[in-house]
Amino acid sequence: SDLALWTGASKQQLGREFIESLARGLTVLTAFGEGRPELTLTEVSRATGLARATARRALITYEHLGLVAAAGRTFSLTPRVLSLGFPPLSRTSLPEIAQPHLADLTSRIHESTSLAVLSDSGEEIQYTARAATARVMSVNITVGTRLPAYATALGRVLLADAPEGVRGAEDLPALTAHTITDKQTLAQALTSVRTQGYALVDEELEEGLRSIAVPIRDSSGRVVAALNTAMHASRRTPSECVTDLVPELTATAARIQTDLHTAAHFTHVPLT
């Protein structure tokens, strides 16, 4: 029912640029969902918050277009509704889903943001999407870049959910004076990541570089990717990273997950 309220608020915000009748009509399609394959006019009106007359006109229009089928007092979506978005979505990957969300996040926090997955070996992360600021950073990150998982915030988020744990040699190379090299200490850090829902890595990959990351989960709850932002340590203290950036990262991760779960209902979504 909040959808109808949202259209009214959007009309107030955007004025003539917002087509309220179109938005209200499209909310009717959203009434049909998992567990609601067939609905009566009253149920559609209740689910969308639209007046019965408005919902009825939308259903009649969609029936004429072949998007909705009527059987007695109930309505249901037809396979033709997939033509509205399925062809392009069927070729959508997680990086493509995430990219506009990364760009939006970067514009809000004024820091570069990235998406990464764990490599097949489990020892590295691979960057799959990125939105960079104009600010120069000493670490040159591009899509496809690989970094050791144990020394990155992205990697720790991914390793914290990996059943195999930390792989590789017993001794982890020290990349800076701050790098955790002991596997037992790293395991404790991963436990903290699972508990708090984010990873903060402070100058372990490179001196002066601070990074914070949160998980991206599939519909089963499995962590399939991680989202982060990184900056020079002088820009924010560790506590400021947590208070200022974790809420922004978490909200963006939730939006990416929503789009991922929606796309996954219709097709397999590649992670890279």
Image (cartoon, rainbow, N blue to C red):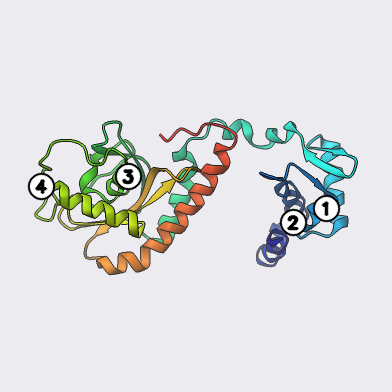
Residue assigned mark 2: 48
Q: How far apart are marks 3 and 1 (CA)?
A: 45 Å
Indicate the quadrant where residue 212 lies: bottom left
Q: Which of 135 and 203 is in front in this view?
A: 203
Indicate the quadrant where residue 229 lies: bottom left
Q: Earlier in the sequence, mark 3 or mark 1?
A: 1
- Residue 187 as seen in the image, left or right of residue 182: right
Q: What residue type is labelled 3?
A: Leu
Q: Which of marks 3 and 4 is nearer the N terminus?
A: 3
Q: Which numbered tag is attached to residue 174?
A: 4
Q: In which quarter of the image is the C terminus?
A: top left
Q: Residues within 10 Å of mark 2 (few under 14, many from 20)?
A: many
- Residue 225's spot in the image, x, y percent? 38, 43
Q: Earlier in the sequence, mark 2 or mark 4?
A: 2
Identified at 41% across, 57% down, the residue is: 249
Identified at 63% across, 33% down, the residue is: 86
Q: Which numbered tag is attached to residue 158?
A: 3
